[in-house]
Image: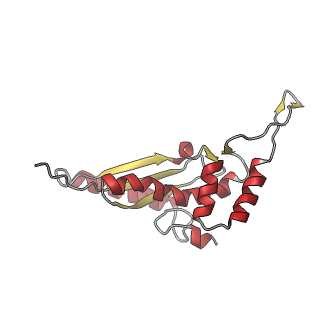
Amino acid sequence: MLNDLINPLQGSFVPGRRAIDNVIIVQEIVHSLNLKKGSVGTMVIKIDLEKAFDHLEWGFIRKMLLSFNFPDLWVNLILSCISSSSSSVLFNGGKTENFWPSRGIRQGDPLSLTFSSYALNTFPRVLMRPFRKNLGNPSKLLVEVHSYPTVFSRMTSFYLVRPPLITVT
């Protein structure tokens, strides 16, 4: 199942790829961009996924699971399980009253890593839509860097986009 979820353009969770490979790729790209002064414009977009995936809302999780062709029954069961759970906090040695999540899953939730791996495959498609419409096709997703123990702590993605030439008459 993971092979179906891992995008071949991503830099993590791919056998034989290491985090240092991503650093080398980015250095080479920046070097080549510096050499291309005066030619067709290119931009690099760096996205800090730690902030982008601070939480995943119920609606997004539903659409994401449906986009991966999960049956409606499974989507409803999953959402029922994750939206009906309750939490409490230990405060000054005592347990607070239970409270229920109202919007989605936050970082640190045991299931957040699972849903975030699905979201990481949804994210590039959604992110690239405006670029394809207005700026041209992105070259590719270049790098994703993950460091543990929390997968969110150092998640970064780089995108290389080549805008089209605009003719003004």
Quarter placement of the N terminus: bottom right
Instruction: Looking at this view, name the residue that lies furthest to the front.
Output: 72
Residue 134: x and y, percent?
Answer: 31, 52
Q: Is residue 101 left or right of residue 35?
A: right
On the picture, is 18 further left or further right than 142?
right
Q: Residue furthest top?
A: 92
Q: State the image coordinates of residue 87 (x, y, percent, origin top left).
A: 81, 41
Query: Which residue is painted at 58% across and 47% down in the image?
Result: 53
Depth order, front residue of 121/49: 121
Residue 147 place in picture, x, y as percent: 59, 52
Q: How is the image coloured?
A: secondary structure
Identify the residue shown where x is 34% and y is 58%: 28
State the residue at coordinates (66%, 54%).
113
Position of residue 114 relative to residue 4, above or below, is above
How many numbered marks does the figure carry? 0
Q: Is any atom of residue 122 visible in this view?
A: yes
Whether residue 27 is visible here, answered yes or no, is no
When asked about the image quadrant of residue 13, the answer is: bottom right
- On the image, the x and y values in percent for residue 20 come to 48, 59
Identify which residue is drawn at 84% across, 36% down.
98
* Of 75 and 20, the residue lying toward us: 75
Farthest residue to the right: give it.
94
